[in-house]
Image: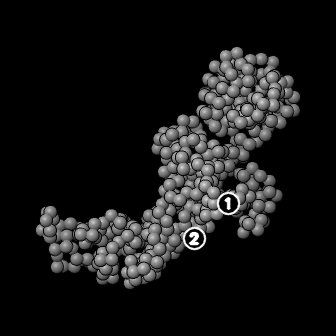
Amino acid sequence: MAASAPSTAALSAPAAVRLLAVDDEPEILALIAATLEPMTACGDLEITSAADGAAAWEAFVRLRPGIVLLDLRLPDANGMELLARMLAADPGVHVLLLTGYYSTASAVEAIQQGASDYLEKPFSVERLRAAVGVLVEEAGRRRQSGELQRELAAHAEVDGMIASGPAMQEVLAAIRRYGPHFSAVLVEGPTGAGKELVARALHRHAGRRGPMVVANCSAIVESLFEAEMFGHVKGAFTGASSDRVGLFEAAHQGTLFLDEIGDLPLPMQAKLLRAIQERQVLRVGSVTPRAVDVRIIAATHHELSALTRAGRFREDLYYRLAALRITVPPLAERREDLPLLTRHFLARYSAEYGKPLRGLTRRAQLAVARYAWPGNIRELENALAAAALHAAADFVDVDDLPEAVRAPAPPGADAATPLLTLAEMERRYARQAVAAMNGNKVQAAAALGISRATLYRLLRSPSAT
């Protein structure tokens, strides 16, 4: 699927970063404005000032600044308390504390509470300009990264699935190959990995006129199996007050998706095999077979070959279904897709709940990246849905995530689900950026906020092949 080159206009001309300067000394506010004037003149920075805590909080809520210069001693507020309040409302904000009463202990406490830096009055022009300049550059990189992630997510979403990494690209390739021609496909993978999404993509690629009908094999009562699958005629049994179409007939000229087929008892397997082989069904209570034109997709979280060897799954049915197989990888084996999946689900539930969430805080991102996700995509989606609902600020923080995700990984967990190194994540992200820009490395480097030399180094790395 060819992707058109995304526009980089927004990436090359970002909006100014908003800075809120809070100090009760007019000369300090004037010094800040004069010191940062080169940044405001070129449009990189937009400054608003406040002389007390009440005005500062009103401006903070109204403007949502990216940077705050905050005096520790205000006539009506304690700077540390205001810092905590601002970070609670927007964990993504950068706060630089200003004080004329410096101590190492207070500086350490400020950093521990979430301040980005701690400047002692009287501060030098160079020190202030350098500290704010670093944060302006970081804000620009974060904005560009967010916009690039949105571009990547748009190009990575295929058939309802986020599939930027090699593991899922193999799945998509199999869907494209099998879709137009299959009569039966077996989709294997752990619970929550997205097997039904794969089935729906296969059905769409088949181009069938009929619908895709879903049968949950683990929920069908054995005594009702034939009536559910093949239908019944009026009077066939007590309660059969009219003719009823079964799932096979409902899927005529379409697809029948047999979910969790590994849970189907052996007697039902025999009846299912006969219907698939003969391409006809016999309604309960009828003597007239009915032809059906149905393609079959079976899915399971079990290893059907092992069940077959154990005598718990019919060998003839297994070979009928498994001529074409697609294995959906667990999330632990496609961690390069995690940032895009996170953004995708957060955007969905932000819109659903009417909350303009801007993303995850850095510590929330770390918790999401560190967690093993044994429940796969379904667990990730549920966790982010809950986090979006709980979030009281513009960013989802670590406390908004479920307890299992917040908790540190147990000893030995890394061996079972190894995390990618930061360097490897950067290498893979660089490759995704180049792909999103249709191979244009100059645009990719600009979008990532790195030099072309750095991009070339990442792409040349042995780990990036």
Residue at left offset 55%, top offset 42%: 400
Q: Could you tell me if residue 202 is visible in this image? A: no
Residue 447 against residue 123 in the figure, above or below: below
Residue 223 drawn at (x, y percent): 24, 69
Question: Between marks 2 and 1, how big is the CA–CA gap?
Answer: 20 Å
Mark toward the start of the polypeptide (2 vs 1): 2
Tell me: 337 left or right of 429: left
Inspect the image, locate mark 1, and give the three-letter code of the amino acid beneath it: Leu
Residue at left offset 74%, top offset 66%: 463
Rate crowding at label 2 as few (under 14), some (14 to 19) or many (20 or more) other CA atoms within 10 Å: some
Residue 96 drawn at (x, y percent): 75, 31
- The residue tagged with tag 2: helix, strand or loop? helix
Tell me: 135 left or right of 217: right
Q: Determine contact: label 2, label 1, CB under 8 Å.
A: no
Which quadrant would residue 230 be assigned to in this image? bottom left
* Residue under pointer 2: 170
Tell me: 83 left or right of 153: right
Residue 419 drawn at (x, y percent): 65, 59
* Disc assigned to residue 121: none
The residue most toward the top is 75
Q: Could you tell me if residue 109 is visible in this image? A: yes
- The residue tagged with tag 1: helix, strand or loop? loop
Residue 26 drawn at (x, y percent): 77, 17
Inspect the image, locate mark 2, and give the three-letter code of the amino acid beneath it: Glu
* Disc assigned to residue 420: 1
Residue 153 against residue 213 in the figure, above or below: above
Residue 416 vs residue 163, the one in the foreground: 416
Residue at left offset 81%, top offset 26%: 102
